């Protein structure tokens, strides 16, 4: 079950920040949304797929913490071709392209939610007040092949990095688990 987030779930430099949208919980069907890649193509994330999905949500790639997070995940997911990894931010696709070139990001997709804020709203990650209003909160979601949210981490302090190992282990487990093709096989 989803509900509209009306409570503080994260903070910016210890000041509570409100999130808006449909707050998703582990076990929910992952909403299907479209983000824009650096080459202005649309990429659909969420829902069922032939790979587990790791969705990394950051306020902006143009900050030191988001930069470090993107680089770390880029290195980590290079070892796991069976995980479809996307970083979502509100950065313009042009800025994302520049970031990817400078940072050597090639093992994951960068997706911008700037057009409709569809991801931020569907997952309850849209910051609705404070200095970062209109951007995404820092969070991680793992979606199983059958389209269920199997892991969620909303980082309590936006200026801090997430628990990488926990999220990566959840993504690896989801990739191994697989989806059944007909309900009888694994």
Image (cartoon, rainbow, N blue to C red):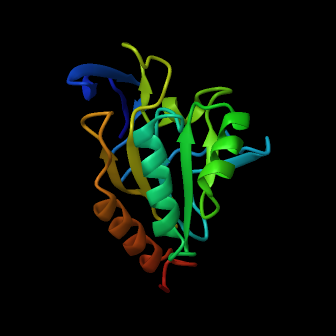
Residue displayed at 50% across by 29% down: 121
State left or right for residue 165 relative to residue 143: left
Whether residue 6 is visible, yes or no, is: no
Q: Residue furthest bottom?
A: 185
Name the residue: 50% across, 86% down: 185
Would you identify the image quadrant in which residue 148 lies?
bottom left
Whether residue 85 is situated above or below residue 176 in the rendered picture = above
Front-most of 155 and 123? 155
Q: Residue at x 43, y 49 (%)?
A: 68
Q: Quadrant of the image for the N terminus?
A: top left
Splitting the image into 4 quarters, where does residue 116 fall?
top right
Q: Is residue 41 visible?
A: yes
Q: Relative to 91, is 141 above or below?
A: below
Residue 157 x/y as whole percent = 26, 34
Tag count: 0
In this view of the protein, which residue sits in the foreground, 112 or 1?
112
Residue 2: where, in percent of width, then height?
Answer: 37, 36
Picture coordinates of residue 39, whole percent (x, y): 79, 45
User: In the current view of this chain or complex, which residue is farthest to the top?
Assistant: 130
Residue 50 appears left or right of 147: right
**Relative to residue 23, is residue 129 depicted above or below?**
above
Left or right of residue 135: residue 84: right
Task: Report which quarter residue 150 is drawn in.
Answer: bottom left
Q: Which residue is located at x 47 percent, y 74 percent?
A: 175
Q: Residue furthest front?
A: 102
């Amino acid at each position: 079950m989803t509900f509209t987030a009306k409570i503080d779930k994260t903070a910016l430099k210890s000041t509570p920040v409100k999130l808006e949208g449909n707050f998703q919980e582990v076990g929910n069907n992952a909403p299907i949304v479209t983000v824009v890649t650096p080459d202005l193509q649309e990429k659909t994330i969420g829902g069922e797929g032939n790979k587990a999905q790791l969705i990394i949500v950051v306020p902006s790639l143009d900050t030191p913490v988001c930069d470090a997070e993107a680089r770390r995940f880029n290195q980590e997911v290079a070892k796991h071709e069976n995980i479809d990894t996307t970083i979502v931010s509100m950065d313009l696709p042009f800025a994302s392209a520049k970031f990817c070139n400078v940072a050597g990001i090639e093992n994951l997709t960068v997706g911008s939610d700037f057009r409709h804020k569809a991801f931020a709203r569907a997952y309850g990650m849209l910051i609705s007040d404070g200095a970062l209003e209109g951007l995404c909160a820092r969070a991680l979601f793992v979606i199983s092949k059958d389209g269920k949210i199997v892991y969620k981490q909303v980082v309590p302090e936006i200026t801090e990095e997430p628990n990488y190992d926990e999220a990566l282990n959840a993504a690896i487990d989801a990739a191994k688990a697989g989806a059944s093709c007909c309900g009888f096989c694994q």
